[in-house]
Each structure stands twice: as C-alpha cells, then as structure tokens.
Image (cartoon, rainbow, N blue to C red):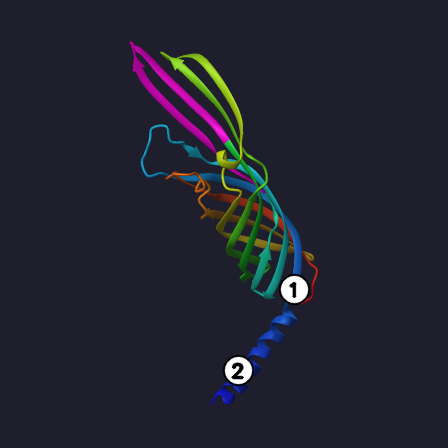
Amino acid sequence: MMKKSTRLFLPVLVSLFISSSAWAQMSVGLKTGVNLSNFSYEEEQSYDDSPGFKTRAGFNFAVLFNYALTPTMSIQVEPGFSQRGAKTSNTIEAVQNNQRYRIEGKGKVVANYIELPILFQYKPQFGKLEGIVSFGPELRYLTTPLKFKSTTKTYVNGELVSEEKDDQSLSGDDGIRKFDIGLVAGVGAAYPIGAVKIFGEARYHFGINNLVGHFDGNESKLYNRGASINVGVLLPVGRK
C-alpha cells in the first residue's frame, strides 16, 4: 500500500517541481516611500503625564529581490532603511493663586532602522494591470541612538512666559531595544512598461516586540506601529 502511494505521489511532486522551475523568475528593483509611523503605548495605570503619541512622517527605501514561484505567487525580500518614531503632545492646565497656567509640550521621537521584510505576495491579473497582496514578517535593527527633540511652552493667563527646547540622544538602558520584529500586510497594483514593472502599494506595519521591555520593573509596553505608502520598479533578470 505504501509503495503504491509513493508511486502515485512522486510523479505529482516531480511535476510540480518541474512546473515551478520552468516558470520561476527572478526580478530586482528599488522602492521608496513615506512612513506614517507611530508608537502604541500601554501601561498598567493611566497617568496625566503619559506621552500622547501621534503619527510622524518619515522616509524609507529598499532594494527588492522578487522570486516568482508561479504567474500569481512570489516571495519578495526587501533589505532597506526606514525612519520611524512618533510625534508627542502633552498639555497641562492648572489654576494657582488666581493665575491660569497652561504648559504645552510638543516634540518628535526619531528611530532609524535597517529593515528586512520577507513577504509572500499574491498577484492576480486584471488585463495588463497586476494586483499585489503582501504579507509576512519584518525584522528591524536600530542603527542610531533614539533621538528626542521637544519644545515646552508655559503660558500664564494666556501669555507666553517661557519657552524651553530639549534635544536628547537615548541609548542603552535609556533608549529602546535595538532589535524589533513585526508583521506587515499590504495591497497595491503594478503596471508593465516594456520589461519594467512600476508599482504602488499601501502597507500596515504591526510591531510585536515590546521596545521598553528591558527596563527593570517597568510595566509599560511600547510598540512600533503605523502605515506606509510606497512606489517602486521591478526588472526581471531571470527567465520564465
């Protein structure tokens, strides 16, 4: 019975391998885009001075290596550089000795990463237009110390009385973890112009590694999150 099953299975396996090998094609390319990044912040208790993170725009670019398994499925590896982080905003108001105090703090956190998404892509055809559905893991390594720049303004009865600026580089125990891992999913479309494919894609990046988990006794959690919008080109270098 086992020999019969093996005789039936092997031809199917060989057929699939030959079909995949006959069609397999390698493409290389470049992409660039804008990150709309943010931090997701969680803590056991809520405090009035908790950071109010907001979306920050940053730059990304990558080299693309796309290996097509079939006409509609491929694996794409994208080593590149990515600017992430967030904006911060916090306002405190109080009344003391019949004076109204308002303190406004605004700033930005800059985290520069080398990133490596490894994506499975499904590419349905719509005439000459090609759809793109991407999903896979994303590895990151922090290349420089975390940068934090902020401005704090103090108002008394609506009048600006002081303005302070701060510029810090945070590393080691004062910064975030150097290594991060996440998931990325995207949708887009590609269009061929001669041998070159031009594409655009929107993605969402979901960090799953707690960036401040190395702090002793820290109960807070911080994750890389956000979207990106990308454009790029792919050029085949293999054969169908």
Q: Nearer the viewer, residue 49 or 204?
A: 49
Residue 93 location, x and y as percent?
34, 20
Judging by the rendered image, the residue that carries numbered circle 1 is: 25
Q: Main secondary structure of the magenta part?
A: strand
Question: Would residue 46 be counted in the magenta stretch?
Answer: no
| SS for dot 2 | helix
Number of the front mark, 2 or 1: 2
Q: Nearer the viewer, residue 204 or 85?
A: 85
The amino acid beneath tag 2 is Phe
Question: Going 44% across and 38% down the picture, which residue do you hit?
Answer: 215
Name the residue tied to disc 2.
9
Tell me if 46 is positioned left or right of 56 in this view: left
Give the residue at x 33% y 31%.
47
Q: Which residues are magenta?
A: 82-108
Q: Label 2 to label 1, Cα distance in Å?
A: 26 Å
How many residues crowd mark 2 within 10 Å: few (<14), some (14–19), many (20+)? few
Q: Position of residue 118 (x, y in %)?
A: 56, 55
Is 206 placed above or below 153 here? below
Could you tell me which residue is drawn at 52 percent across and 44 percent down?
A: 228
Q: Residues within 10 Å of mark 1 (few under 14, many from 20)?
A: some
Relative to 227, residue 237 above or below: below
